[in-house]
Image (cartoon, rainbow, N blue to C red):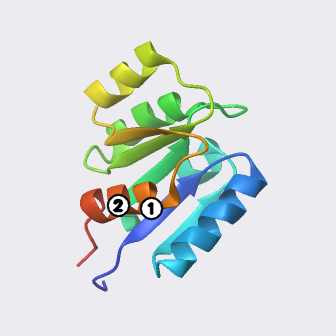
Amino acid sequence: MTNQTRVAVVDDDPRVRESLESLLDAAQIEAHFFPSAESFLAEDIGRFTCLVSDVKMPGMSGFELQRHVLDRRPSLPIIFISAYPDNSRISEAISLGAITFLQKPFDGEELLGWIEKSCRPLK
């Protein structure tokens, strides 16, 4: 394995995925993009150093995704993003190990800071 940060981004909105692709590419961070929680879970999630996930998506929500990730890879850092904050759900997600919750629209530099701080490279 290389000494590389590898981020998975799960968001159903193609504009958000495109925006995050530009941001992460400019920061030279390897990222893989998924339009749904289900498509992410179909992958080998062990190859990622962290997960950036929307909360409100068709099908499985980001919070439901977190529970699946906890079963398969409890050490995977999760950064939630959403335009629809729900304080009780956010508190629950943080108590289950989510790193942070960023409300859309968020500052790209803030997201990059969380990724740098939380998403240790694979060795």
**Which residue does the image show at 60% across and 62% down from the upper left?**
20
- Disc 2 crowd rating (10 Å Cα; few below 14, some 14-19, many 20+) is few
**Which residue does the image show at 33% across and 38% down from the upper left?**
98
The number of discs equals 2
Secondary structure of residue under mark 1 = helix
- Disc 1 crowd rating (10 Å Cα; few below 14, some 14-19, many 20+) is few
The image shows residue 106 at horizontal and vertical percentages of 54, 47
Secondary structure of residue under mark 2 = helix
- Three-letter code for the amino acid on which mark 2 is drawn: Gly
Question: In which image quadrant can residue 114 be found?
Answer: bottom left
Q: Are marks 1 and 2 in contact (CB under 8 Å)?
A: yes
Question: Which quarter shows the N terminus?
Answer: bottom left
Q: Is residue 42 in view?
A: no
Question: Which quarter shows the C terminus?
Answer: bottom left
- Three-letter code for the amino acid on which mark 1 is drawn: Glu
User: What residue is pinned by disc 1?
Assistant: 109
Q: Nearer the viewer, residue 35 or 109?
A: 109
In this rendering, would 89 be left or right of 73? right
Q: Is residue 84 in view?
A: yes
Question: In which image quadrant can residue 29 be found?
Answer: bottom left
The image shows residue 19 at horizontal and vertical percentages of 67, 63
Question: In which image quadrant can residue 2 be found?
Answer: bottom left
**Which residue does the image show at 76% across and 56% down from the upper left?**
15
User: What residue is pinned by disc 2?
Assistant: 113
